[in-house]
Image (cartoon, rainbow, N blue to C red):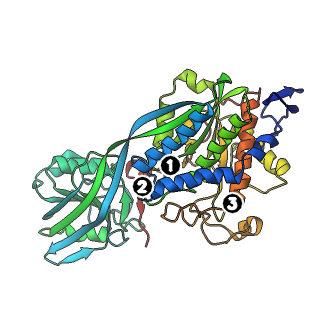
């Protein structure tokens, strides 16, 4: 870990305004007395915002998913609070792909052997994300299949070329093998050839035989498309088999938005972005994921105004939309930055899930010393600010590193070389015996047992973690709001590895 150079500063309040005097110049991240802000940012204050998010979900079918009224009310709540506090608020709207299954899909062999294949099961099938809708019964027709399968994965080119459908009978259901090109390309070629439905089945090699959950990448395909187990596809492609497919889903482009609220004062060439995901998944209200981070940065922003803190650097608080749809909101924001805008952003602080019930105190590994994935130059200074805080100001609280694996809203920022850092208390990962001995909780269970589930409600929380991480977040926000040193990056850091199959043929296996 890098060593943090320190400022020695004193705080004083004159006429209600927090003032700062520096005495020693700094070379990297600075050490600033932040207790005034930390004391003002209380668990009760953060929980009040979480309660508001819960009430919004309660009034909107138990969800705050992007593209729904529950999300729009969340946007209104945050933007109203920030406007009333005196921040300069911008609502940044964008289009995003929306998909929702309205009821379980069905896949049946009607003739010659009546069979109902299990939905969302490793031995059956699952609807492709962004599938079209339909209730069709037709003959299944195999398309350029490699049977028996090759011994090496991704050698099947089934459905990847329009020529694969030469002689295909319009009105039939296309049975296509996974491999080589994207699911979307296969489905579009089938639809163009007149198919009324598409079954994409696994290739058949060891480890690639189960049904899988794939994505078509976005709306546009209008016929039903499912991903099936190898045995199902092989059975239906034998010739002369009549199949029924039923999918009832919404696949369309919707509008969502980011909430951006910045301090009126502060250096425009050294902007501190403080971000958190605002939307929930469809399945639940998302009060921990990520109502915890969203509520915490909202309370930090409000208390900064209440204390009349005038930042040396401009602070831009951001609540990202459609993050559960693939980090759409933060990506849209970064994509629309000019080169000058990117250069003017000093860093991104990211707070995604900071109150997990079975928590661990994770800090993003800015220098990659523990996870082998480093953030852009400057990220190590952000990491060190958090580590110094937990070690010194918070009373030697233990922490663990977490990798910049691209799963949260910092990802677009580090891609363009903006240094980043933040906090995380765990999602679907499993707590180890060693972690339970250090942090308490239950070994062998998820850090957040309600991750992406309906039970992610106001009661799904560790108040201890929320208190500690909110204080740490407040410390970092004020530290970088007041620093006179630069943490701007010049490198894009180390990217997490991606398999070629993930790029060409994204899909995850279903589990029972």
Please tell me the numbered disc located at residue 15.
none
The residue under label 3 is 463
- Give the x, y percent position of residue 288: 58, 57
Comes first in the chain, label 1 or label 3? 3
> In the image shown, does 221 or 49 lie closer to the viewer?
49
Q: Secondary structure at mark 3?
A: helix
Quadrant the N terminus occupies: top right
- Give the x, y percent position of residue 50: 58, 53
> In the image shown, does 429 or 281 lie closer to the viewer?
281
The residue under label 1 is 498
Mark 2 is surrounded, within 10 Å at the Cα level, by few (under 14), some (14 to 19) or many (20 or more) other residues, namely: some
Does residue 230 appear in this view? yes
Distance from Cα at disc 1 to Cα at disc 3? 36 Å
User: Is 152 situated left or right of 303 in this image?
Assistant: left
> In the image shown, does 181 or 475 lie closer to the viewer?
475
Q: Are marks 2 and 3 in contact (CB under 8 Å)?
A: no
Q: Look at discs 2 and 3 and give the one toward the viewer.
A: 2
Q: Quadrant of residue 482?
A: top right
- Give the x, y percent position of residue 32: 82, 36
Distance from Cα at disc 1 to Cα at disc 2? 37 Å
Please tell me the numbered disc located at residue 60.
2
Q: Residue at x 48, y 40 (%)?
A: 329
Distance from Cα at disc 2 to Cα at disc 3? 26 Å
């Amino acid at each position: 870990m890098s060593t943090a150079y320190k400022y020695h500063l004193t705080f004083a309040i004159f006429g209600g305004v927090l003032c700062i005097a520096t005495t020693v110049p700094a070379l990297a991240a600075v050490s600033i007395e932040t207790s005034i802000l930390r004391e003002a940012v209380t668990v009760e204050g953060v929980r009040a915002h979480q309660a508001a998010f819960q009430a919004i979900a309660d009034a909107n079918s138990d969800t705050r998913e992007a593209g729904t009224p529950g999300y729009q009310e969340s946007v209104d709540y945050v933007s109203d609070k920030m406007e009333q506090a005196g921040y300069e608020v911008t609502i940044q709207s964008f289009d995003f792909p929306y998909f929702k299954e309205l009821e379980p899909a069905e896949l049946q062999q009607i003739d010659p052997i009546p069979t109902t294949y299990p939905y969302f099961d490793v031995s059956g099938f699952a609807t492709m994300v962004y599938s079209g809708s339909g209730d069709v019964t037709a003959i299944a027709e195999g398309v350029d299949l490699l049977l028996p399968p090759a011994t090496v994965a991704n050698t099947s080119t089934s459905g990847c070329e329009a020529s694969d459908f030469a002689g295909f009978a319009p009105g039939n259901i296309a049975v296509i093998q996974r491999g080589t090109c994207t699911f979307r390309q296969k489905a579009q070629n089938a639809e163009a050839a007149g198919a009324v439905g598409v079954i994409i089945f696994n290739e058949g090699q060891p480890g690639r035989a189960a049904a899988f959950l794939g994505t078509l990448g976005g709306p546009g395909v209008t016929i039903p498309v499912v991903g099936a187990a190898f045995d199902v596809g092989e059975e239906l492609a034998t010739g002369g088999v009549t199949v029924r497919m039923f999918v009832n889903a919404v696949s369309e482009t919707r509008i969502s938005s980011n909430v951006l609220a910045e301090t009126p004062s502060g250096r425009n060439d050294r902007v501190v972005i403080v971000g958190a995901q605002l939307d929930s998944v469809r399945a639940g209200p998302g009060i921990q994921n990520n109502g915890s981070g969203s509520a915490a940065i909202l309370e930090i922003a409000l208390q900064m105004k209440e204390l009349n803190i005038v930042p040396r650097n401009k602070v831009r608080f951001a609540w990202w939309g459609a993050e559960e749809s693939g980090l759409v909101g933060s990506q849209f924001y970064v994509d629309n930055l000019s080169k000058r805008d990117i250069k003017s952003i000093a860093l991104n602080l990211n707070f995604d899930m900071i109150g997990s019930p079975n928590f661990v105190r994770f800090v993003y590994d800015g220098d990659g010393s523990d996870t082998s994935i480093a953030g852009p130059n400057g990220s190590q200074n952000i990491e060190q600010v958090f580590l110094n805080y937990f070690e010194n100001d918070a009373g030697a609280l233990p922490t663990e590193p977490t990798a910049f694996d691209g799963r949260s809203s910092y990802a677009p920022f580090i891609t363009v070389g903006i240094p980043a850092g933040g906090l995380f208390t765990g999602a679907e990962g499993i707590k180890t015996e060693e972690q339970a001995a250090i942090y308490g909780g239950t070994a062998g269970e998820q850090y957040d047992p309600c991750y992406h589930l309906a039970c992610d409600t106001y009661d799904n929380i560790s108040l201890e973690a929320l208190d500690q991480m909110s204080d740490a977040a407040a410390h970092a926000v004020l530290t970088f709001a007041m620093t006179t040193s630069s943490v701007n990056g010049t490198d894009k850091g180390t990217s997490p590895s991606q398999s070629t199959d993930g790029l060409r043929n994204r899909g995850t296996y279903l589990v029972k």
